[in-house]
Image (cartoon, grey):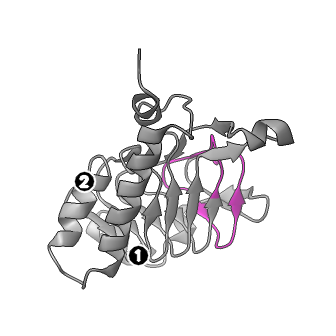
Amino acid sequence: MKTELEKALAGLEYDARDQEVREMQAQVKKWCHEFNHATPNDPIKSSLLAKLVSGYNDQVFIEEGFHCLFGKNIHFEGMAMLNYNCTILDSQKVYIGDRALIGPGCQLICTNHALDADERLVGLFDNKPIRLGRRAWLGANVTVLPGVTIGEGAVIGAGSVVTKDVPANHVAVGNPCRVIRPITAEDKLMRDVLLQRGA
């Protein structure tokens, strides 16, 4: 039988009041604090991130102000960039695709309190995974809510609150976030240069 912490790290429902779970979260909070207060280029930053998240490599760039719940439920699938002041509440699995960009002030929230007040008071949560596709980009201050998948190459406009899936290679904006159009060749800022390079 799995412990509550094992359930939490496996992306299963767990009791957030469990002592071992609370101790793990306290350790993660300490590591985040050390990371956020280390000087730039201090090698301890890389070693702390390796302890915190899954799939960390030297092509994962995370700026100061980073916070998470467990860390190990965050899975990097290659290169990625998280700008300043990002929060990931990884009470479920969070998959961040290769070359994904996450703008400053973004929040990826896997957990939701129970709507019923009695259930809320005893600590019941509804946890769902989040998936950010390869080469997707979240603009500044985007909030992604539980259970959302953002497709490959999608762009989410600054300040959006994403409550539903966004298809690959589309632009979506707003609160609640809505898909407004596909991304086309006409959107390339340097279309002619990129074509010459074979991009």
Would you place residue 4 above or below residue 157 in this image?
Answer: above
The amino acid type found where label 1 is placed reads: Asp
Q: Is residue 178 left or right of residue 24?
A: right
Location of residue 3 (image quadrant): top left
**Callout 1 secondary element:** helix
Give the residue drawn at x 32%, y 63%: 31
* On screen, residue 117 above or below 158: above
Q: Residue at x 45, y 77 (%)?
A: 84
| Residue 21, x across and y down, in percent | 45, 41
> Which one is in front, 12 or 95?
12
Q: Position of residue 96 (x, y in %)?
A: 42, 50
User: In the displayed image of the protein, which residue is found farthest to the bottom?
Assistant: 39
Query: Position of 66 compared to 160: left or right?
Result: left
Residue 96 in sight here: no
Q: Give the residue pinned by disc 2.
A: 51
Q: Which mark is residue 132?
A: none
Which residue carries the number 1 mark? 192
Q: Which residues are magenta?
A: 144-167
Q: Quadrant of the C terminus?
A: bottom left
Query: What secondary structure is found at the residue carrying circle 2?
Result: helix
Q: Quadrant of residue 195?
A: bottom left
Instruction: Name, please, the residue furthest toward the left.
Output: 43
**Residue at 33% over, 80% down:** 37
Measured as percent of width and height from the top left, residue 129 is found at 55, 39
At label 2, the amino acid type is Lys
Q: Is residue 9 magenta?
A: no
Instruction: Tell me the CA gap for discs 2 and 1.
Output: 43 Å
Please tell me in which quadrant of the rendered image residue 114 appears.
top right
Q: Earlier in the sequence, mark 2 or mark 1?
A: 2
On the image, the x and y values in percent for residue 139 come to: 57, 71
